[in-house]
């Protein structure tokens, strides 16, 4: 598994990282069972398989319900094998979540994450922005709490999970070592932000790299339903003769060619599918397919 260096961290992360949302919270395309999280035993087996495959980055959050707890229970004894990223600001209140970006709430959240993850230090703590991100930035309490936690040795690096103009503001602030942003073949709005991070040595973690399932075989089950980017998705499927695995390969290669991206976070409830994505990333494809796919999305 190829690793890419994050200069602000002086660390290398695998190009594919594990997004641990689905092991702790009901999530995903479809309804009912399709969204149901695995049980604790299944989640543990999946986490071990991820580490055994060579992945060295795991991304979770307080808001991912039982995700932090399951990571702590299952693989805390393998802590030296992975870089651990979590998030604060959106808090677990299962079956829902709530937002509190005050200094005390964030400090308590970080302590709670350390306890659940069974670790003395979290490598990357990211702001999990909510409905009023401008206020969080202006108030500054969240960043202050994170900086104080860093000074106390509880976290190593600061990150922010946000897009667009506010992401650019965070990048230019100098406060953050990592940015987590949405970026994929269907949504390239953060292209400039990725380049700016590269110039400043800031790491970039990509969420929704496979379009929340729209760029995977799952999409074949929902073509009759309303969905974002439906016209482009149908045109992309026409391009690959409805070979959705090839579509995933193109989508992954699109991300791979961008050397400003440090790691693409891929979540799954099923390791076989996760492993398949790594195989699809390595699959050789005709470069003209990637060019045509990009043209379809921009048309």
Image: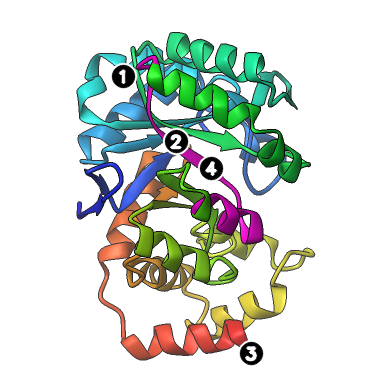
Residue at horizontal 64 percent and vertical 13 percent from the top: 104
Depth check, mark 4 against mark 1: the one in front is 4
Q: Which mark is residue 75?
A: 1
**Residues rendered magenta in the picture:** 152-171
Residue of label 3: 299
Q: Residues within 10 Å of mark 2 (few under 14, many from 20)?
A: many
Q: Secondary structure at mark 2?
A: strand
Is residue 104 visible in this depiction of the protein?
A: yes
Residue of label 2: 158
Q: Which mark is residue 160?
A: 4
> Which quadrant is home to the C terminus?
bottom right
Residue at horizontal 51 percent and vertical 55 percent from the top: 172
Q: Is residue 53 left or right of residue 197?
A: left
Quarter residue 283 falls in:
bottom left
Residue at horizontal 49 percent and vertical 69 percent from the top: 244
Q: What separation in Å lies between label 2 and label 3 (alpha carbons)?
A: 37 Å
Is the C-beta separation of discs 2 and 3 under 8 Å? no
Q: Name which of mark 4 and mark 1 comes first in the sequence.
A: 1
């Amino acid at each position: 598994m190829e690793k890419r260096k994050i200069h602000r961290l002086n660390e290398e992360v695998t190009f594919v990282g594990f997004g641990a949302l689905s092991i702790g919270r009901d999530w995903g395309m479809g309804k009912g069972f399709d969204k149901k999280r695995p049980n604790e035993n299944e989640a543990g087996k999946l986490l071990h398989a991820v580490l055994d495959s060579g992945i060295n980055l795991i991304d979770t959050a307080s808001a991912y319900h039982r995700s932090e707890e399951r990571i702590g229970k299952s693989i805390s004894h393998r802590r030296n094998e992975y870089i651990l990223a979590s998030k604060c600001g959106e808090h677990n209140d299962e079956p829902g979540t709530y937002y509190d970006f005050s200094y005390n709430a964030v400090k308590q959240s970080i302590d709670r994450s350390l306890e659940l993850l069974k670790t003395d230090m979290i490598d990357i703590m990211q702001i999990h922005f909510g409905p009023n991100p401008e206020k969080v930035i202006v108030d500054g309490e969240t960043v202050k709490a994170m900086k104080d936690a860093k000074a106390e040795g509880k976290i190593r690096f600061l990150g922010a999970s946000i897009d667009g103009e506010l992401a650019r503001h965070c990048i230019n602030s100098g406060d953050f070592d990592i940015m987590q942003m949405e970026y994929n073949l269907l949504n390239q709005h953060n292209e400039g932000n990725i380049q700016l991070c590269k110039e400043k040595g800031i790491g970039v973690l990509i969420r929704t790299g496979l379009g929340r399932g729209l760029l995977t075989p799952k999409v074949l089950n929902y073509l009759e339903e309303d969905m974002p980017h439906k016209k482009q998705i149908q045109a992309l499927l026409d391009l690959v003769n409805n070979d959705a695995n090839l579509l995933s390969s193109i989508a992954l290669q699109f991300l791979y060619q961008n050397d400003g991206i440090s790691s693409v976070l891929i979540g799954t409830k099923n390791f076989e599918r996760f492993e398949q994505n790594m195989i699809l990333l390595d699959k050789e494809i005709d470069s003209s397919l990637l060019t045509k796919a990009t043209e379809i999305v921009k048309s």
